[in-house]
């Protein structure tokens, strides 16, 4: 039986007179009033049991193998649920790394009769570690991933991406959070960290008498998505979290197979969205609700300072209209309301001022794009298609030159949502039906964009230097195995070298910038070694020289493997 690691209880550091935290004059006035009213009880465990289940936090990954295997977990108290687990947990361990780290892990398949590959959703890994379905391994096998973390801090996740089994394996439990952190940056910006920074993996579950994670979609559900009637947050049904009245940071992931969540509180309170799939959006956007599609992430700040101690507030998925056909299984349909979790305000607290300076992301300039590609999202013969084609594992659908900006235009010709996800690159949402995008989930760097029924969405996407095979697909996982394309990011072309051979000196130069390229030299075209010393920027070129007279020495620029 699995025991989950419970979160640290929220701390009240800012309320203690001996705290090193800096309080504003307004905060001190409130603090004094609270003390006079006898409401300050430092160290008090202020809550008893609440109805439902305390929010679980999966364990932090310890650097060891990540093993997928069938297992029994206690999701509902006193009941054993058959699931697919990673290291015995549903969801799997939370991976927390920093920029500059290397994610180095053995992935072990101990499933029964099922291949497996894991995709690192939101990371920009070398293609060979991305988790393409053609990298799946058989039961009993394992493989290693080595991914340098070279991107900005972001809330990412990982999940199964096995050929024809993604929906089934993710539904049965093979997913977890992947956080790229920078606590020093967050402290400077004034963003909550530590025990006030809570990841919330939100997914739905279709109830059944055996309390199992059973994946058995009907024909209707293959078309419209496998929707549950109960929300699990970090694997917790009917979840609650004890909080104080202060400011909290929640990282929200929609890990449902197909349900779009309209996130909001039941008292319609305002909260602030500040980060996207790819990190900070550059703003603190006040909202009362926003739509979060499968695969998408946001980070929010929420404050409970206007709720008295002893009160509570619930996070919900709110109603939204969608023209779904009649028929299908009973239970909440797409767009129907569902409770997500409850926050019990058990202790006094003081809200922090909102951060005022948020660094803006370096988004692509669409005017620099070289081409536009059109992707028509449709249904042909009962199958979900891109440009009238159903996915084929061995077919490369298009090629993309490296290091360029492209416009991708998604036209939804169906009556269903399609959250379109790109592997290996982030993009900026440019427009919805030719209007400027206004959704909170359109801000910043995205890797997944919702294309609403009968809508056209344009994005500007910037490709990096890591060549190989990547995917574009719908993250409604019942559509994924059909509404998907392979694209090849082509090998980067090195900048042209200019070599000036003098009597006692060789000067090698090439255009600047040339991100990632490294100069090598060889005397026999067989053994190559990195040139010693850094090239110098001279006007708009990079220049490197050595004192030698070697007329038969060769030079080349290379892109190091696994960059
Ligand atoms: Cu879709």
Image: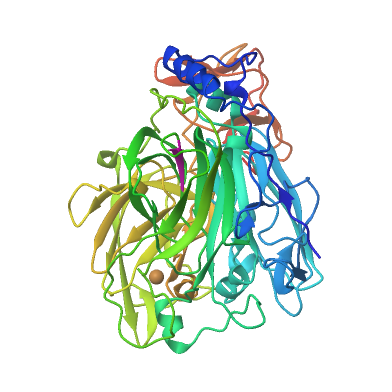
Q: How is the image coloured?
A: rainbow
State the image coordinates of residue 141 (x, y, percent, origin top left). Answer: 80, 68
Q: What residue is shown at x 39% (from left), y 23% (from top)? A: 357
**Front residue (pair 329, 376):** 329
* Residue placed furthest toward the left: 434
Residue 523 relative to residue 219: left or right: right
Q: Residue furthest front?
A: 37
Q: Quadrant of ligand 1?
A: bottom left
In the depicted view, which residue is nearer to us: 511 or 501? 511
Say if the magenta span includes residue 300.
yes
The residue shown at (42%, 25%) is: 355
Q: Is residue 136 visible?
A: yes
Q: Quadrant of residue 185?
A: top right
Could you tell me residue 463's position as x and y percent? 44, 46
Q: What secondary structure predominates along the stretch shown in magenta?
A: strand
Among the 4 quarters of the image, the one containing residue 513: top left
Quarter of the image where the N terminus is located: bottom right
Q: Position of residue 127 (x, y in %)?
A: 58, 53
- The image shows residue 99 at horizontal and vertical percentages of 61, 33
Is 97 covered by the magenta stretch?
A: no
| Residue drawn at x 58%, y 53% as measured from the top left | 240
Q: Is residue 558 visible?
A: no
Q: Give the magenta-colored segment's residue range.
A: 298-304
In the rendered picture of this protein, how many numbered marks are placed on residues?
0
The C terminus: image quadrant: top right
């Amino acid at each position: 039986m699995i025991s989950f690691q419970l979160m640290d209880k929220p701390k009240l550091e800012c309320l203690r007179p001996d705290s090193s935290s800096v309080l504003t004059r307004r905060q001190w006035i409130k603090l004094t009033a609270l003390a006079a009213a006898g409401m300050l009880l430092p160290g008090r465990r202020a809550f008893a049991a609440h109805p439902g289940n305390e929010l679980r936090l999966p364990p932090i990954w310890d650097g060891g193998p990540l093993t997928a295997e069938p297992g029994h977990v206690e999701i509902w108290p006193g009941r054993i649920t058959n699931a697919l687990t990673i290291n015995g947990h549903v969801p799997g361990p939370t991976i927390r790394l920093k920029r500059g780290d290397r994610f180095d892990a053995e992935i072990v398949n101990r499933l029964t009769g099922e291949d497996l590959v894991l995709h690192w959703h939101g990371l920009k890994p070398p293609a060979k570690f991305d988790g393409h379905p053609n990298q799946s391994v058989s039961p009993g096998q394992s493989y290693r991933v080595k991914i340098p973390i070279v991107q900005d801090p972001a809330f990412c996740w990982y999940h199964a991406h096995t050929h024809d089994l993604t929906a089934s394996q993710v539904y049965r439990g093979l997913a977890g959070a992947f956080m790229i952190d920078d606590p020093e940056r967050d402290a400077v910006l004034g963003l909550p960290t530590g025990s006030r920074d809570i990841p919330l993996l939100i997914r739905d579950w279709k109830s059944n008498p055996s309390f199992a994670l059973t994946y058995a979609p009907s024909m209707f559900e293959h078309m419209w998505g496998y929707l549950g009637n109960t929300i699990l947050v970090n694997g917790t049904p009917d979840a609650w979290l004890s909080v104080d009245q202060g400011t909290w940071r929640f990282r929200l992931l929609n890990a449902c197979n197909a349900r779009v969540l309209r996130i909001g509180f039941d008292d319609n309170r305002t909260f602030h969205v500040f980060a996207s799939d790819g990190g900070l959006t550059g703003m603190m956007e006040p909202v009362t609700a926003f739509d979060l599609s499968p695969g998408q992430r946001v980070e929010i700040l929420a404050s409970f300072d206007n709720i008295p101690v002893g009160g509570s507030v619930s996070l919900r998925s709110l109603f939204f209209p969608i023209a779904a056909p009649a028929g299908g299984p009973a239970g909440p349909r797409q767009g129907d309301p569902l409770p997500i979790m409850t926050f019990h305000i058990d202790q006094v607290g003081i809200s922090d001022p909102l951060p005022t300076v948020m660094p803006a992301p370096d988004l692509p300039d669409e005017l620099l794009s070289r081409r536009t590609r059109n992707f028509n999202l449709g249904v042909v013969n009962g199958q979900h298609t891109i440009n009238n084609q159903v996915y084929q594992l061995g077919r490369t659908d298009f090629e993309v030159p490296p290091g360029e900006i492209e416009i991708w235009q998604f036209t939804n010709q169906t009556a269903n949502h399609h959250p379109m996800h790109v592997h290996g690159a982030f993009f900026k949402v440019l427009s919805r039906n030719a209007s400027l995008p206004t959704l909170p989930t359109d801000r910043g760097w995205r890797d997944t964009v919702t294309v609403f029924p009968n809508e056209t969405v344009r994005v500007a996407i910037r490709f990096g230097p890591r060549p190989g095979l990547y995917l574009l697909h719908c993250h409604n996982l019942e559509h994924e195995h059909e509404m998907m394309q392979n694209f090849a990011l082509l090998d980067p072309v090195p900048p042209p070298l200019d070599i000036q051979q003098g009597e006692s000196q060789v000067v090698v130069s090439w255009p600047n910038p040339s991100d990632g390229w490294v100069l090598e030299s060889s005397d026999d075209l067989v053994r190559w070694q990195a040139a010693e010393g850094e090239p110098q920027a001279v006007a708009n070129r990079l220049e490197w020289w050595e004192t030698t007279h070697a007329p038969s020495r060769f030079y080349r620029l290379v892109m190091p493997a696994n960059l």
